[in-house]
Image: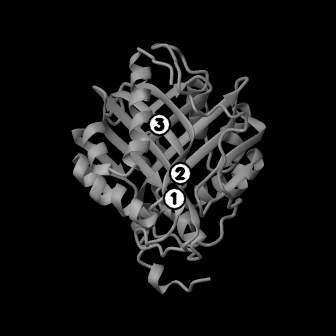
Amino acid sequence: MTAIVTPLGRAKATAWKALPDLLGPHPLEAARRHLSGHTQWVVSHPIHELIGPDQVVESFLEPLKRAMPDVEQRTELFFAGHWDGRIDGGAGTWVTCTGHYLGTFKEPLWGIPPTGEPAWLRFGAFYRVEDGQIAEARILLDLVDLARQAGWPLLPPSSGLELLVPGPRNATGIQLNGPEDGARSACLPLVEAMIGGLGRYNQKDLRSMGMDQYWRSDMMWYGPCGIGSSRGIDGFQRHHQQPFLVAFPDRKGGHHRARFGEGDYAASTGWPSVRATHAGPYLGTPATHRPITMRVMDWWRQEDGLLVENWVLIDLPHLFLQMGVDLLAALPQTEKR
């Protein structure tokens, strides 16, 4: 890896070195070296908040390594940026990545039974780097998809495609070098304009959001298991946007812990990112009319002024808990297929 002296370059080098070490043979030693003493990790349900390197190892890394002893991280996107913390704190330099943990699934993982075969656990992560160490992490795991691979469906079959989510079609997702500090992202302003369009929904016609101004006709949207992936604006609306708006018509977004871009990429996460009322059926669960929040992560790629790919993770087990359904607790009672 070429040495980069900018703050963004140093943060990337820190994360790129730390992540494989944390999954290596000595995770506690690696955690104490690469994580700050008061590092705060917030991981999707059922892990939640972890403080300090020892808790990160005990409650996140060790369970993952016991379940998949040969686990490796397959990273599809990796880039960085600065965030000013103006919405929900988190000011600083962030590195984000998404992809899969791949390993032979030999022991149970958070209630999901092993298969003895290779399994792909989709993940998304945001790391805030300070003084050469990871000071904060936000991580989402697609446990619903891991359970599906193990033959234990936690939700009805996805409306969209259930597939092994790929990286960018142009293979540019790993941004190890650059950018210069202060360089503008071509993607972030487009994403922010698109999000503004979402807020113009008139509660009647999806066209009121003007999504065709922001997305290319052959765009790909890669959602979590339970929703699935789709192609084109029509597919995105049929498989995700329309069901989502029926279920959560008063949704409000924008509570971001981090939002930044690098070159043709942008990313955001919120804890929560969305607040809404569960007013209609969603993924097989009738309306409860309860207030809910959503932990969400998004990564976008643009080409020639239009968005062409969007990777999305939602902490669905945490969302469903708020709707009165404990997806993971249902595992022992679910008929194995």
What's the CA distance linking mark 3 and mark 2? 13 Å
**Circle on res. 336:** none
Give the residue type at disc 2.
Answer: Leu
43 vs 67, nearest the viewer: 67
User: Which of disc 2 and disc 1 is earlier in sequence?
Assistant: 1
Residue 287 drawn at (x, y percent):
51, 69
* Camera-nearest label, 3 or 2: 3
The single residue placed furthest to the front in the displayed view is 25
- Residue 231 visible: yes
What's the CA distance linking mark 1 and mark 2? 7 Å
125 vs 201, nearest the viewer: 125
The single residue placed furthest to the left in the displayed view is 37
Q: Secondary structure at mark 3?
A: strand
Name which residue lies at 33% across and 50% down.
42
Residue 78 drawn at (x, y percent):
53, 35
**Circle on res. 313:** 2
Q: Residues within 10 Å of mark 2 (few under 14, many from 20)?
A: many
Residue under label 1: 142
Give the residue type at disc 1.
Answer: Asp
* Camera-nearest label, 1 or 2: 1
Pointer 1 with pointer 2, Cβ within 8 A: yes
User: Which of disc 2 and disc 3 is earlier in sequence?
Assistant: 3
User: Which of disc 3 and disc 1 is earlier in sequence?
Assistant: 3
What's the CA distance linking mark 1 and mark 3? 17 Å
Q: Residues within 10 Å of mark 1 (few under 14, many from 20)?
A: many
Residue under label 3: 96
In the image, residue 95 above or below residue 27: above
